[in-house]
Amino acid sequence: MELGSVFLILAILVIVGVYLYAPLTKRSRRLDTEEAHEISALKAERDRAINALQELDFDFKLGKIPAEDYPEQRAALLQKGADILRKLDELEPASSSAKNAETRIENAAASKRADSTTQTAEPNDEDIEAMIAARRKRHKSKSAGFCPKCGKPVLVTDKFCPSCGKALGG
């Protein structure tokens, strides 16, 4: 047998092996995709539980929820969030931490609440004047005023009025 025919037979065997192995790789990718979808769904459910907990706290502060019902509803939401986090930890063991699942839900709700209630401090008069001056400077560099013929606004870079075509002194 010649060396070329040996290489041809080896190449055919490699191609057949790759062809037979291909379905096995697709199945593992499909399992990874299904797991990724499940993780995504659990994360969305976790966010809904956090939002529901935040709304429950807000409604309680406004007096919409009676004081006797609030602890039960809050405990139920915390339990639901904890269950979701446990499922997530089973699917993503690398992201699990030593914290208790209920504590993690509580911290997430508190951080969302803090983000929504933070207000920026009002700027003082000097800051406002500086912002106005900067805006006027930007505006002057863009606008050259108005066309002497039609009165439409023109830019510094315009040689002719975009509306009426009058030549601008430049």
Image (cartoon, rainbow, N blue to C red):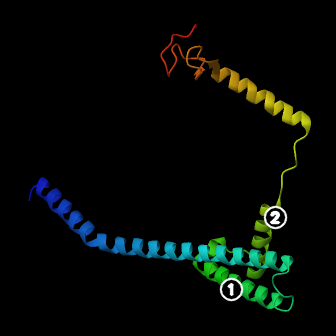
The kind of residue on which mark 2 rests is Ala
Instruction: Assign a secondary structure to mark 1.
Output: helix
Give how far apart the Cα atoms at labels 1 and 2 are.
22 Å
The residue at the point 85 percent across, 31 percent down is 129
The residue sitting at the top extreme is: 169
In-image side of 70 versus 146 (left or right):
right
The residue sitting at the left extreme is: 1
* Whole-percent x, y for residue 37 in the image: 50, 73
The residue at the point 83 percent across, 88 percent down is 71
Between label 1 and label 2, give the one nearer the viewer: 2
Name the residue carrying label 1: 80
Mark 1 packing: few (<14 Cα in 10 Å), some, or many (20+)?
some
Residue 61 to residue 145: above or below: below
Name the residue carrying label 2: 114
The residue at the point 55 percent across, 10 percent down is 168
* Disc 1 + disc 2, Cβ < 8 Å: no
Q: Earlier in the sequence, mark 1 or mark 2?
A: 1
The kind of residue on which mark 1 rests is Lys
